[in-house]
Image (tube, rainbow, N blue to C red):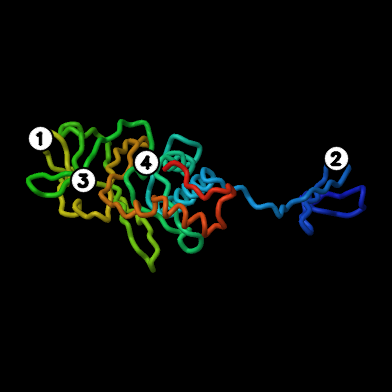
Amino acid sequence: MKKKSTDLGLIIPSKIRIAGMTFYKRGNQVVGRVSESNEKRSNTPSQFKQRQKMRHTMALWKMLRFCDTMFTQRQTAYQNFASLANRLPAVYVTKGLMNQASFLMPGIPVSDGTLSTIRQQLGTVDGHPALLTDLKAGEWYRGEKLWLYTAEQCIESNLPRVRFAVREMSRNELADVDGNLALVDEVFSDEMKGWALVRIMDNRCSPQAVITRCAMYQQFATDEAFQAAAKSYGGLTESSFLSPGM
């Protein structure tokens, strides 16, 4: 909204930036302040680590948001996802195209809610790869749904990216293994994929995260990766080029 300045006799926006100065109205006065600084932004090891974590969180969310997701414990789904994803290991990438990189790793959150968590692990059933759960074979409640999220580590034009997909499972797709439900399929041997089975009932869900054997992300979590990434961003503000505790 534009306001009239009685001091200058001009119609000016409520805030305007000119030549590195921001001018805004305070009462009947027009006040100016410096809006830009030539000082280098602080970039300590801990700050750089957190910025790289946030970069990766945003890159993951850009992929996951195309799926149906349920994050019900914060004001927005992204805030909920970001608070959980911040617990993931930091991965370090160089400035440029790699800013868009995302990596498949254990613990990527795909849902958060009030239903009880499904404990799950990768294993075998009669020699066949399987996703094992602690869901009891006789405890499929009326109105309950199970969504299977699949995450896949892809390389697209030399850029690592995680692609997500989700589908609803039918009861006959799950096997009874010693009284617990399991998914048995050769796909569960794929070391570039990960999975999470989520319980859904009305507007509630179970908090779940991806389990995977994928280890590609580990090469981007090393001290060498940290130092290469920091250098590409102009280095650290501390005199000693050290990595944070990782």
**231 or 216, nearer to the observer:** 231
Q: Which residue extends farthest left? A: 126
Along the polypeptide, which appears first: circle 2 or circle 4? 2
Q: Amino acid at mark 3?
A: Ser
> What residue is shown with label 4?
111
Residue 170 - label:
3
How far apart, in angstroms, are the residues tagged by discs 2 and 4?
48 Å
Residue 65 appears anywhere in the view = no
How far apart, in angstroms, are the residues tagged by discs 4 and 1?
27 Å
Determine the residue positioned at 61% across, 47% down. Answer: 42
- Which structural element holds mark 3? loop
Q: Are marks 2 and 1 in contact (CB under 8 Å)?
A: no
> What residue is shown with label 1?
178
How far apart, in angstroms, are the residues tagged by discs 3 and 1?
19 Å
Along the polypeptide, which appears first: circle 2 or circle 1? 2
How far apart, in angstroms, are the residues tagged by discs 3 and 2?
65 Å
Residue 27 - label:
2
Mark nearer the viewer, 3 or 2: 2
Q: Amino acid at mark 1?
A: Asp
Determine the residue positioned at 15% across, 47% down. Answer: 184
Q: Which residue extends farthest bottom? A: 157
Q: Are marks 2 and 4 in contact (CB under 8 Å)?
A: no
| Label 4 Cα crowd, 10 Å radius (few <14 / some 14-19 / many 20+) | many
Q: Are marks 4 and 1 in contact (CB under 8 Å)?
A: no
- Which structural element holds mark 2? loop
Q: Amino acid at mark 2?
A: Gly
Along the polypeptide, which appears first: circle 4 or circle 1? 4
Q: Are marks 3 and 2 in contact (CB under 8 Å)?
A: no
| Label 2 Cα crowd, 10 Å radius (few <14 / some 14-19 / many 20+) | few
Decide if residue 48 is on the left or right side of residue 10: left
Which quadrant, please, contains the C terminus?
top left
Badge count: 4
